[in-house]
Image: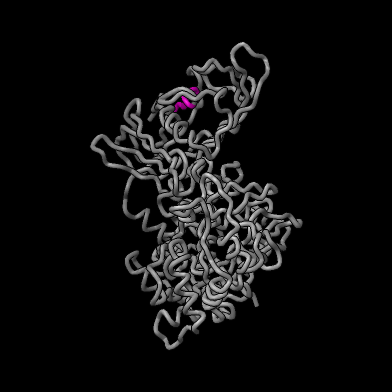
């Protein structure tokens, strides 16, 4: 049947296979530029395998803000990732999901994801494209299935149209859904903070306090919060006491290795002023609390990162005076990117 | 629509001869098909066990000719869940196989995540339906093997649960196996051939490595998983080819 139909059409349009390209008029779907900021490293995400387009991005954004991704139709990605707070959850310590279910971890901010190698606090997602499976299917988050989401999307004419416009095969399927979400997420680049403008010599300058804080940061924090992404993307135990309510084993859940127990991903510090509460379980409300922890709140354990151990004494942590803490915090606030927080391209409305 | 049809017609135009292959999996112990729940088996650690669930992912199917030339089944269509409980799941119908004489078959157990992950993303809903996705991780369970067991000389039974998959980027448990066909597979125009593959389930416990349930009855993300994955990679053989 199909074979005959094919021949009929070919005869009707009277072209050979080799000239299909000339006669096929693609739907208007402009490519979007993925621009690496001048002070950024090369992305980890291979853009050539999923080049963002106008329609792909639009679809990704629509999916990001659509409660249909959850079983109760209410919890969207944007529910726990709010732009005002650099796409993290602000009012709750740990994420909230369907039916008021409580997660065990603090939603992470979303920015510069194309430059990250692994995702979530323990690295459970080895690739950005498949990361959405975790929140979609987790009972305490969206409690859905990928198949269930696709069925709901197929029933919506606006999605039928958008998928058809965004992708050559025009299909509503898992691959295209993940592609679209990634196209939206890889373009979420935050690189216009005061710090960036200084790093790129665009005329901004640190205040005296910020400059002092930057010097302290470089000597006391930057071995883990490395480079312009402010993370070396490693997993470390930073001496948090184990909360018996969660007993979160951290990276061990992914690798199964006892040496990885209580290790969590070193988070980026970009927009850190906005992404409170802090740590994987959101236990600290303020940056002051965080620095108090590093100065004198750490607890000993077998997998505590050696970087926090003192060479000559049994002390653990990073010695900091109150004044130094203030200076560091004032530097950290230069990482806030107001342009990103207000960028309409990423806004729900 | 027109473009799609034109592409199909191009495929028909290039005159390649294609046939089909049914790949039939049979999960056995002592050369007999296993019987879920009621079949009783004993491993080399003298542990008597019954099996309540056996599922595994087969992917990246390749047919290999004597001279080493390969016919790769389209990767995006090459992901399947073999589920002992569902007989239809154990017969894979592969179509559009290039003609030729093949002497080996190669396939993956699990999903090769080192490749671009979206290649197999359309398999996600199927994997989900079969409970082959870990919801806390974006990875697949490659093998799911569950049941209960009794230790030698004892009467109480305990459940066992062996789930094997990759551990993020840290540990890749994806395995590829290449096995000789028992006789040459000849693909000609419009023929449908059959390859019967036997999976010797007992080898999950006893092969390159020995796994005792008394020592460990629950394996998920665990340093033991690569030992089991190695064992699984030895359990397949081709018992029959009919052209």
Q: Please name the colour scheme applied to the rendered image.
A: one colour
Residue B123 appears left or right of A297: left
Q: Residue furthest left?
A: B67
Can you say whether A293 is above or below A260 in the image? below
Image quarter hosting the C terminus of chain B: top left
Q: Residue furthest top?
A: B153
Residue sitting nearer the eye, A331 or A227: A331
Q: Which residue is drawn at 44% across and 69% down?
A: A218
Can you say whether B36 is above or below B1 in the image? above
Q: Which residue is drawn at 58% across and 55% down?
A: A298
Q: How many labels does the image show?
A: 0
Residue A86 appears left or right of A50: right
In the image, which residues are magenta?
A: B197-204
Can you say whether A264 is above or below B163 in the image? below
Residue sitting nearer the eye, A223 or B231: A223
Q: Position of residue B50 (x, y in %)?
A: 61, 22
Residue B200 drawn in magenta: yes
Where, by quadrant of the figure, is residue B19 drawn?
top left
Q: Which residue lies furthest to the bottom in this view?
A: A203
Residue sitting nearer the eye, A95 or A180: A95
Q: Where is residue B115 in the image (x, y as percent from the top left)?
A: 40, 51
Q: Position of residue B173 (x, y in %)?
A: 44, 40
Where, by quadrant of the figure, is residue A288 drawn?
bottom right
Q: Residue at x 31, y 38 (%)?
A: B64
Residue A92 drawn in magenta: no
Residue sitting nearer the eye, B99 or B104: B104
Q: Position of residue A108 (x, y in %)?
A: 58, 63
Q: Residue furthest right?
A: A99
Residue A92 appears left or right of A216: right
């Amino acid at each position: 049947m199909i074979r005959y139909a094919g021949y009929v059409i070919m005869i009707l349009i009277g072209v050979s296979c080799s000239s299909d390209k000339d006669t096929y008029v693609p739907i208007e779907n402009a490519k979007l530029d993925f621009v690496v900021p001048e002070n950024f490293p090369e992305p980890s995400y291979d853009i050539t395998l999923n080049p963002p387009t106008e329609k792909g991005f639009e679809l990704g954004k629509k999916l990001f803000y659509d409660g249909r991704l959850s079983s109760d139709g209410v919890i969207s990605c944007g529910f726990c990732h709010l732009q005002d707070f650099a796409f993290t959850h602000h009012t709750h310590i740990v994420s909230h999901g369907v039916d008021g279910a409580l997660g065990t971890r603090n939603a992470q901010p979303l920015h510069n994801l194309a430059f990250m190698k692994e995702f979530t606090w323990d690295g459970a997602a080895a690739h950005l494209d498949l990361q959405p499976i975790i929140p979609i299917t987790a009972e305490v988050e969206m409690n859905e299935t990928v198949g269930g989401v696709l069925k709901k999307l197929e029933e919506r004419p606006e999605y039928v149209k958008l998928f058809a416009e965004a992708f050559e095969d025009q299909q509503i399927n898992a691959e295209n859904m993940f592609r679209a979400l990634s196209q939206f997420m890889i373009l979420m680049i935050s690189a216009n903070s005061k710090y960036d403008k200084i790093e790129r010599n665009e005329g901004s300058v640190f205040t005296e306090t910020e400059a002092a804080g930057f010097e302290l940061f470089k000597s006391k924090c930057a071995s883990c919060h490395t480079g312009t992404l402010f993370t070396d993307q490693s997993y470390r135990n930073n001496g948090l006491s184990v909360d018996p309510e969660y007993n979160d084993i951290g990276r061990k859940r992914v690798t199964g290795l006892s040496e990885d127990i209580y290790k969590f991903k070193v988070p980026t510090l970009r927009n850190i002023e906005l992404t409170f509460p802090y740590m994987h379980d959101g236990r600290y409300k303020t940056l002051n609390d965080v620095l108090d922890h590093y100065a004198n709140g750490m607890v000993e354990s077998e997998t505590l990162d050696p970087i926090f151990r003192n060479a000559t004494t049994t002390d653990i942590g990073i010695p900091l005076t109150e004044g130094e803490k203030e200076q560091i915090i004032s530097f950290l606030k230069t990482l806030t990117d107001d342009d990103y927080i207000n960028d309409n391209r990423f806004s729900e409305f | 629509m027109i473009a799609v049809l034109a592409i199909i017609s191009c495929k028909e135009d290039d005159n390649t001869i294609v046939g089909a292959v049914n790949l039939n999996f049979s999960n056995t112990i002592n050369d007999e098909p296993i019987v879920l729940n009621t079949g009783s088996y004993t491993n080399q650690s003298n542990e008597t066990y019954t099996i309540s669930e056996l599922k595994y992912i087969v992917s990246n199917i390749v047919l290999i000719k004597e001279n080493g030339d390969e016919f790769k089944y389209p990767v995006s269509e090459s992901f399947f869940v073999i589920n002992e409980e569902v007989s239809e799941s154990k017969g894979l119908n592969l179509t559009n196989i290039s003609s030729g004489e093949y002497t080996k078959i190669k396939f993956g157990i699990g999903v090769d995540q080192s490749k671009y992950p979206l290649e197999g993303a359309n398999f996600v809903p199927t994997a989900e339906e079969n409970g082959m996705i870990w919801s806390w991780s974006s990875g697949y369970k490659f093998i799911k093997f569950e049941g209960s067991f009794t230790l030698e000389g004892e009467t109480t039974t305990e459940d066992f649960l062996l789930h094997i998959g990759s551990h993020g980027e840290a540990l890749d448990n994806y395995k590829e196996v290449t096995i000789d066909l028992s006789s040459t597979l000849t693909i000609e125009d419009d023929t449908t051939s059959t390859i019967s593959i036997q999976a010797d389930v007992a080898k999950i416990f006893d092969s390159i490595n020995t796994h005792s349930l008394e020592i460990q009855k629950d394996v998920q993300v665990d340093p033991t998983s690569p030992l089991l994955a190695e064992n699984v990679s030895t359990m397949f053989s081709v018992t029959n080819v009919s052209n």
